[in-house]
């Protein structure tokens, strides 16, 4: 049988000679360029395997393979291709002896129509980037922000960013040092993402970001924890304490709402209590009026959330067996009070109610919306009402790999994906999971030393402490948006 020829059509000798010369010249220029770049940038040479499958253009011929060291640069120029394609890359940044960053590239390029592939078999979970190759052959790398929720706690003597003596906004329940806690290491841990750096909180820059705006926290007492942290972080930007005041004259406590005005920056930092984001009310069942949760109706304070420039929502802490009456005659939709409804189903329906309200009433061109993920409690030997404790912990946990992704977080993520309004998930679950040392424990009240056998608080957080890192992530996202490079 006659072997197939590489070309199914004939070529004139002159044309064949020109094509051979052009191909040889291209190989020579490519090799010379490679040598020049390798000599000029020896620190970024990478081992790469290239395979060009040209079978569609040249039936019967074997693919051409190149193996060797090829330098990587941000702007690459190649031969023209018929269609644009996407290149998914992962990059890991390290530093050589010269102190210059070294980029290792693990990449995979696919274009099914042209059968063009570039692969490197090593795996990585580092920075993810996408590169688009246009018809002109130019490759442009589009950098995505790293996962700031994935990292570790680093002990830093430059922390905390404020003290309980310099901030009068910390209420008794979070003021652990004033309540007698003697160790101070829990204040000195800084969150460090694995693959990038987040900026240290700068009070003046943050105030400029919210100048003339309303920054509003909406949620349960854990969000009040974060709100008080934000007030303390912002205070260094104010030279005259009298230029900051609560517009209703209230002192921070467990009141339903607060609004602090920063006169010099013409902004307010506000907090509105709502345990579930939906309406807590009453309904008649038989001859009795009972407390219910209207999971189909947004909380009545929602009219005061509207018009905010930055909204930070949360709910999770109260969605437990005890605080929802085990789901028996508690959840209400319309006039119907469910005899029984499990917490997960009720939580999902409540979140859909919240999402619908956001989509109807929030203008994304004016308001940036965040939803903070759930944070763990660290009770050992029982729960908050059955002898649970955490007071012996003085350092973060070393490992949280045994912790499953909370179901409430999965539900929130699903809801956010289906919303019309862009909402950024402020994912602080993992970083908070390590911090068993950060809770008030017995130091949530001034009488702690008098009666240490009383119940411990292993749900809320000491200030200064862990919520400061949540706000540093919020600061990071707000800065990113101002620079026009919103993290994904």
Image (tube, rainbow, N blue to C red):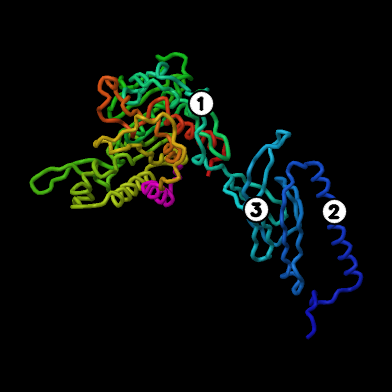
Location of mark 2 (residue)? 29
Image coordinates for residue 186, horizontal then vertical, percent: 43, 27
Location of mark 3 (residue)? 107
> As displayed, is residue 434 above or below residue 296?
above
Of discs 2 and 1, which sits in the foreground? 2
| Residue 17 shown left or right of residue 198 in the figure | right
> Quadrant location of the N terminus?
bottom right
Front position in the image: 218 or 126:
126
Of discs 1 and 3, which sits in the foreground? 3
Do the CB atoms of the residues marked 1 and 3 lie less than 8 Å apart?
no
Which comes before the other along the chain, label 2 or label 3?
2
| Residue 20 shown left or right of residue 373 in the figure | right
Q: Is residue 426 visible?
A: no
Q: Which residues are magenta?
A: 405-426
Of discs 2 and 3, which sits in the foreground? 3
* Residue 292 falls inside the magenta stretch: no
Q: CA distance from mark 1 to mark 3?
A: 40 Å
Image coordinates for residue 363, horizontal then vertical, percent: 43, 41
| Residue 286 shown left or right of residue 273 in the figure | left
Q: Which mark is residue 208?
A: 1
Residue count near mark 2 (Cα–Cα under 10 Å), binned few <14, some 14–19, many ≥20: few
Image coordinates for residue 458, horizontal then vertical, percent: 33, 33
């Amino acid at each position: 049988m006659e072997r197939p020829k590489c070309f199914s059509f004939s070529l004139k000798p002159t044309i064949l000679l020109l094509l051979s010369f052009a191909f040889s010249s291209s190989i020579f220029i490519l090799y010379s360029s490679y040598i020049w770049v390798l000599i000029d940038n020896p620190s970024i040479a990478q081992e790469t395997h290239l395979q060009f499958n040209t079978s569609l253009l040249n039936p019967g011929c074997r693919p051409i393979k190149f193996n060797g060291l090829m330098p990587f640069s941000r702007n690459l120029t190649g031969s023209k291709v018929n269609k644009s394609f996407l290149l998914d890359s992962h990059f890991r940044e390290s530093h050589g002896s010269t102190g210059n960053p070294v980029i290792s590239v693990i990449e995979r390029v696919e274009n099914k129509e042209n059968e063009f592939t570039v692969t490197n078999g090593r795996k990585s979970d580092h920075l993810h980037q996408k590169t688009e190759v246009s018809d002109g052959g130019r490759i442009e790398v589009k950098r995505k922000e790293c996962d700031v929720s994935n990292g570790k706690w680093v002990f830093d003597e430059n922390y905390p960013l404020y003290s309980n003596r310099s901030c009068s906004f910390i209420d008794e329940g979070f003021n652990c040092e004033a309540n007698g806690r003697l160790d101070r290491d829990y204040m000195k841990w800084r969150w460090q993402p694995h693959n990038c750096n987040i900026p240290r909180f700068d009070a003046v820059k943050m105030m400029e970001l919210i100048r003339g705006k309303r920054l509003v926290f909406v949620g349960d007492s854990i969000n009040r924890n974060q709100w008080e942290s934000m007030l303390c972080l912002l205070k260094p930007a104010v030279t005259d304490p009298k230029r900051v005041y609560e517009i209703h004259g209230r002192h921070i406590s467990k009141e339903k709402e607060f609004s602090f005005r920063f006169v010099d920056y013409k902004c307010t930092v506000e907090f509105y209590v709502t345990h579930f984001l939906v309406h807590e009310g009453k309904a008649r069942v038989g001859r009795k009026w009972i407390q219910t949760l209207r999971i189909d109706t947004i909380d009545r304070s929602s009219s005061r959330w509207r018009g905010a420039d930055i909204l930070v929502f949360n709910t999770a802490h109260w969605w437990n067996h005890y605080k929802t009456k085990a789901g028996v005659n508690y959840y209400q939709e319309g006039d119907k009070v469910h005899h029984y409804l499990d917490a997960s189903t009720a939580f999902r329906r409540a979140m859909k109610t919240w999402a619908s309200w956001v989509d109807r009433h929030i203008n994304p061109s004016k308001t940036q919306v965040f939803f903070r993920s759930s944070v763990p409690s660290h009770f050992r030997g029982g729960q908050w009402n059955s002898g649970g404790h955490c007071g012996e912990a003085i350092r973060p946990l070393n490992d949280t790999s045994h912790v499953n992704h909370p179901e409430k977080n999965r539900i929130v993520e699903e809801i956010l994906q289906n919303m019309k309004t862009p909402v950024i998930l402020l994912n602080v679950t993992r970083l908070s999971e390590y911090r068993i040392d950060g809770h008030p424990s017995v130091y949530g009240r001034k009488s702690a030393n008098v009666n240490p056998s009383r119940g411990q608080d292993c749900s809320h957080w000491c200030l200064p402490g862990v919520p400061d890192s949540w706000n540093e992530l919020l600061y990071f996202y707000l800065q990113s948006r101002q620079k026009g490079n919103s993290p994904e």
